[in-house]
Amino acid sequence: MNGKLLLMLAVVSAPLVFAAISSDEAQTIASPYIGSDSDILLLSKPMEVGSGIYWLYFYSIYSPKKVLIAVDDDNGALVTDETRLSTAAAALYKMRIIDEYVEKNKYSFDVIMPVVQSSAGVVMQNQNKLSDLRAQTEAKYPTLSFDAVETNLQRVSDLENDVLPTLQDGSQMWQSFEDSYAASELPYVLDTYGTAYDGLFGIFDAYNTYSQSITELQSQVSRSGIKAPDSDSIYNSLENMRDIGLSSLYAKFASQDPRTGMQSLLNNEDRWVNDSTASFFFRKTRKEALESYDALQQTANYIISSESVLKACDKNLGSQVTTFKRNWADIEYYRTKGTSDAYSKMAQLLPQAQSLASTIQGTYNRKCVAASATPTPAQQNTDFGPILLVLLFVVLAYAYFKYLQKKGE
């Protein structure tokens, strides 16, 4: 299946992504897991991965810090399914290779394609110049052969014409992805980059061969005994055809082969995905454990500080408090360790501690508080408050009546 067909299929099958929730809403959902970290990055719009569309928060692929936080654009829920999160992380990593390596280092289709297009035009001009030079020179100096130069220049032309459609397809694929943010297109973009780079290095090799054939023909001119000014004219004409407009691009790619850099990053994909998803689950477990801890801490402190009162109230409470203290000591120990396993242990122990605390409180309220608050028959007294209020009202009313009567007299 050629690149153009793949592109057409990708464009037809990948609808544009429209956000159902805003970036601010997604930020609100993700912020408890981000904190105040200013290094965290966010895509400009949600990415379609498989059957889901997600807002993604992450660090640079070069950062020592790792995390991936995904918010489902459809329902605004935090993505906690490990398979979905890992799939999203893998797609994001491929995109970031293109953004942070290919685009940043100017190895992109849109940088390479204009250079190759311009070079193809120069090569065509050189072919015309070479044809004219050959016709003029071989007629006068038949021992000189331009065959190698002509063949090698034609090879450069053929390779450039072969790679240009690949560069065009790749550029369109990447533009399609940027429009849709559909992750299904990313493997094709990366594959096309690999094909384009292979083609480009093929052009460089062919150019080196072409340049070498020019040098060899110039040596033949020097050894042939051709006199000036003809020898100088032939030599200089050949030299003027040496440059085909690839010098700067060739120097850049010769200093750093992008195929090597890209492959190195692709080899690190699994590790980045695993580390980023593991970091999210660590943050999630820590947040939930510490929230549960904070909710129970005041009750725990009360139970522990009131141990003697609780034991005096009911003998069974004594053993329950002892168990609670032991459980709470374990929770405190794991909290201070602060590791992923420790927070997982906290998450397991806290519901048990909460249940035991509720039992202790219930027993205390039932057997101690209620008993001390219920008065005995001998302690029950009649409440004369309402009667006294009525009498006071009557006295005040009578006094006011007498005051009006006296004022009238």
Image (tube, helix red, strand yellow):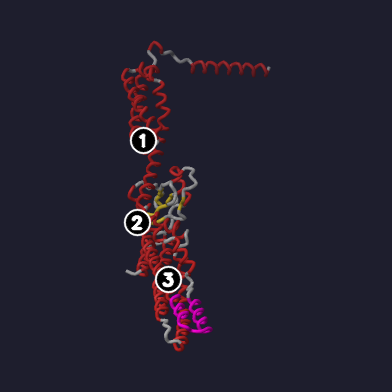
Of the image marks 3 and 1, the number of the one nearer the N terminus? 3
Residue tagged by mark 1? 342
Q: Which residues are magenta?
A: 215-241
Label 2: element kind: loop
The quarter of the picture where residue 301 lies is top left
The quadrant of the image that shows the N terminus is bottom left
Residue tagged by mark 3? 208
Which residue is at the front of the view, 56 or 400?
56
Compute the Cα span from label 3 to label 1. 61 Å
218 sits to left or right of 407? left
Query: Can the viewer see residue 203 in this picture?
Result: yes
Q: Could you tell me the amino acid type at mark 1? A: Ala
Compute the Cα span from label 1 to label 2. 34 Å
Q: Could you tell me the amino acid type at mark 3? A: Asn
Q: Is residue 404 magenta?
A: no
Residue 298 picture location, percent across and down: 43, 28
Q: Which mark is residue 50?
A: 2
Q: Could you tell me the amino acid type at mark 2? A: Gly
**Residue that extends furthest to the top in the rendered view of this protein:** 378
* Mark 2–mark 3 CB contact (< 8 Å): no
Which residue is at the front of the view, 28 or 114?
114
Of the image marks 2 and 3, the number of the one nearer the N terminus? 2
Q: Nearer the viewer, mark 1 or mark 2?
A: 1
